[in-house]
Image (cartoon, helix red, strand yellow):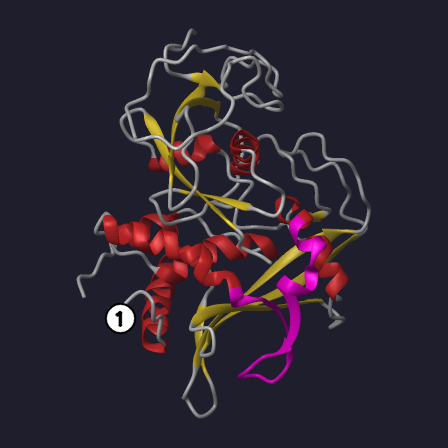
Amino acid sequence: MAEEQESVLQLLPSSAAGGEGLTDVSPETATPEPPSSAAVSPGTEEPAGDTKKKIDILLKAVGDTPIMKTKKWAVERTRTIQGLIDFIKKFLKLVASEQLFIYVNQSFAPSPDQEVGTLYECFGSDGKLVLHYCKSQAWG
Amino acid sequence: MEEDEVFGEKTFQHYCAEFIKHSQQIGDGWEWRMSKDCSDGYMCKTHFKIKNATVVSHPGTSGHGQTCLPLEEALELPSDDFEVTETAAASEVIKYEYHVLYSCSYQVPVLYFRASFLDGRPLTLMDIWEGVHECYKTRLLQGPWDTITQQEHPILGQPFFVLHPCKTNEFMTPILKNSQKINRNVNYITSWLSIVGPVVGLNLPLSYAKATSQDENVD
């Protein structure tokens, strides 16, 4: 099942944005997702199951957190919040001492093991799940 | 509601009350307790977990690196991918207590907690640190004394572990500012606990997130 690929990128599990030319993330005014060259990398951790679909996630920055150039991602349902956090941290090149939080409803942080598929069921609308993310030097 | 810069005790109690209301609806076990002279109050919950002494690799889990298996409200985690391969023989039940108190000095809520085996043996600080979720472990172990310390419970006078509140304002402010911007009320306690809870093994069911937006009382 081919997903629309003009503005939807597959979530890469390890190396972030390999070969896409997305280097430094510069803060930009919020624009509707630009049609970026979607280098679709099939690298996934889980075996490609028929029942495992992907869901669309829209990432929005909160506070002083850098805005991701690519905001819309297709993510497998079983991806955990923790996995997503790791990905964004790498993407934004955050250092280890910086913590990143992800919120649903702009106010509630799901636990790290929560799967995005479940969140989509509960909080998704218009075919996507909106997640806000915020970086913080939360501890120390 | 008071200005968001000043999170006073009344505001604290108000949000706790709202939080407990939802807890009661879903049977999440949070209660309100008062001090003997009824001057202070706090929120608390007792929770049991099974900890396996045997360390076995968990291939089927989604990055769940710790040896502590949460015997959790099954509402939360879809257990399809979660294969329990360990036997129950070497497991022990641990009793966790979580208390949410108000800190006058920091003017924020603070999470106190303690854990013990059923025979009363308390868990050590080392046990606690090891039980911290993988994603927080690195940061925590760099400077554990900054974050989890042991202190006397202000009301009970017993030793508890505390998640240090000095950075609370820092991670709460963006949420509060944002909620002002979008003109939506946020339950401070719910948001705060959803963030700090997982660090020490306390995960809030997702329904709390919805409860906040539903029970929007106009102050």
Kindly identify the amino acid type of the residue bearing the numbered disc 1: Glu
To which chain does the residue with label 1 belong?
A: B
Q: Quadrant of residue B169?
A: bottom left
Question: Measured along the vertical axis of the image, is residue A121 above or below residue A11?
Answer: below
Left or right of B27 on screen, residue A16: right
Question: Measured along the vertical axis of the image, is residue A40 above or below residue B130?
Answer: above
> Which of A85/B98 is in front?
A85
Is residue A33 visible from the viewing direction of this image? yes
Question: Measured along the vertical axis of the image, is residue B135 above or below residue A128?
Answer: below
Residue B22 at what x, y percent from top left? 35, 59
Would you say residue B159 sits in the magenta stretch?
A: yes
Which portion, as a residue range, is magenta?
Answer: B139-166
Report the residue marked by disc 1: B2
Q: Residue at x 42, y 7 (%)?
A: A2
Residue B165 at what x, y percent from top left? 52, 67
Would you say residue A114 sits in the magenta stretch?
A: no
Residue B32 at what x, y percent from top left? 42, 74
Left or right of B115 on screen, residue A104: left
> Which of A33/B183 is in front?
A33
